[in-house]
């Protein structure tokens, strides 16, 4: 009996890990990347709130929203540069600023560089930042846009492709996030900005401990179904099979009496011998 329980528990853990990892691996990776992307957004918002600005909070926020839209629009592959949409956004920003914005020229069709320079120009008009603060603000903004784009591109891939590239993206994004967070802490100071290093455990996907830990933390319908399936497979079905199997007593007759774990089992013959 003890050996059976040990084997059943071992099989249950292995089967749960295999099933859970097989069907949840992609979801685990994409959820982790979304969380990291959200961390970038929070980092940007928190760092920006520590800077000194020439305008009130509401105006500054509106300018920042329009600026991000402009930066993305300038890099739009379908209509790069200063199309009608870009010009409309510039006009809106100028109204908020109360001053004109210089229309910069693209160099070698590098619209990403153009968007970055336009963003820096607007930042300089809005805030009173030191060179280090201005560079930090720009780098965080670029990182937010970059990782938002990468995550969106990842979501369009097949599950197999997601599984193949996700861990690499997670490692890269966390490295950049932690570097920017540490820079912000150094530039702004501990009294204005506190930062904690963020790590990921997705390298442990496929290990039994991670599967159970993730399932407990995110317990829901799918986790319940996998748990129930493994219980049926490794405990309930084997016990039912054992209980319905006849036992052979010492007198040679078939009885249902006696322990199925201590006596020799004999099942009915489904196909009789001729």
Image: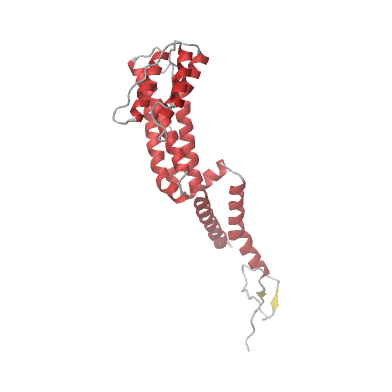
Side (left or right) of 59 relative to 122 = right
15, 158: nearer the viewer: 158
Q: Would residue 65 be visible to someone looking at this image?
A: yes
18, above or below 66, in the image: below
Whether residue 188 is visible, yes or no, is no
Residue 246, picture quadrant:
bottom right
The quadrant holding residue 174 is top left
Give the residue drawn at x 62%, y 86%. Answer: 273
Viewer-closest of 259 and 90? 90
Give the percent coordinates (x, y) of residue 220: 61, 44
Assign the C terminus to one quadrant of the image.
bottom right
In the displayed structure image, the side of residue 9 where residue 193 appears, left or right = left
Q: Residue at x 46, y 38 (%)?
A: 152
Q: Position of residue 161 (x, y in %)?
A: 43, 49
128 shown above or below 144: above
Q: Residue furthest left?
A: 108
What is the quadrant of the N terminus in the image? bottom right
What is the quadrant of residue 169 in the picture? Answer: top left
Going by the picture, which residue comes out furthest to the front? 84
Residue 240 is situated, as x and y percent measured from the top left of the image, at: 66, 64
Q: How many marks?
A: 0
Question: Image check: 82 left or right of 235?
Answer: left
Of residues 209 and 214, the one nearer the viewer is: 214
Q: Position of residue 164 (x, y in %)?
A: 41, 48
The way the protein has been coloured in the rendering is: secondary structure
- Image: 258 above or below 171: below
């Amino acid at each position: 009996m003890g050996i059976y329980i040990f084997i059943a528990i071992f099989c249950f853990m292995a089967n749960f890990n295999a099933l859970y990892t097989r069907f949840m691996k992609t979801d685990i990776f994409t959820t982790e990347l979304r969380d990291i992307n959200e961390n970038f957004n929070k980092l940007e918002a928190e760092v920006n709130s520590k800077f000194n600005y020439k305008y009130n909070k509401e105006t500054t926020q509106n300018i920042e929203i329009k600026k991000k839209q402009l930066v993305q629009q300038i890099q739009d592959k379908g209509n790069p540069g200063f199309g009608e949409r870009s010009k409309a956004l510039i006009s809106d920003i100028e109204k908020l600023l109360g001053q004109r914005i210089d229309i910069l020229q693209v160099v070698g069709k590098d619209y990403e560089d153009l968007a970055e320079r336009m963003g820096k120009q607007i930042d300089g008009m809005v805030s009173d930042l030191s060179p280090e603060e201005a560079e930090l603000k720009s780098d965080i903004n670029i990182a937010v846009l970059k990782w938002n784009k990468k995550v969106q591109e990842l979501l369009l891939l097949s599950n197999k492709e997601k599984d193949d590239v996700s861990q690499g993206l997670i490692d890269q994004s966390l490295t950049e996030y932690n570097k920017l967070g540490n820079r912000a802490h150094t530039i702004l100071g501990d009294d204005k900005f506190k930062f904690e290093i963020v790590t990921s455990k997705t390298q442990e996907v496929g290990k039994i401990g991670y599967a159970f830990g993730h399932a407990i933390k995110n317990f829901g319908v799918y986790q319940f179904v996998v748990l129930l399936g493994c219980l049926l497979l490794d405990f309930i079905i084997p016990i039912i099979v054992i209980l319905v199997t006849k036992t052979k007593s010492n007198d040679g007759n078939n009885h249902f009496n006696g322990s199925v774990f201590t006596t020799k089992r004999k099942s009915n013959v489904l196909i009789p011998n001729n």
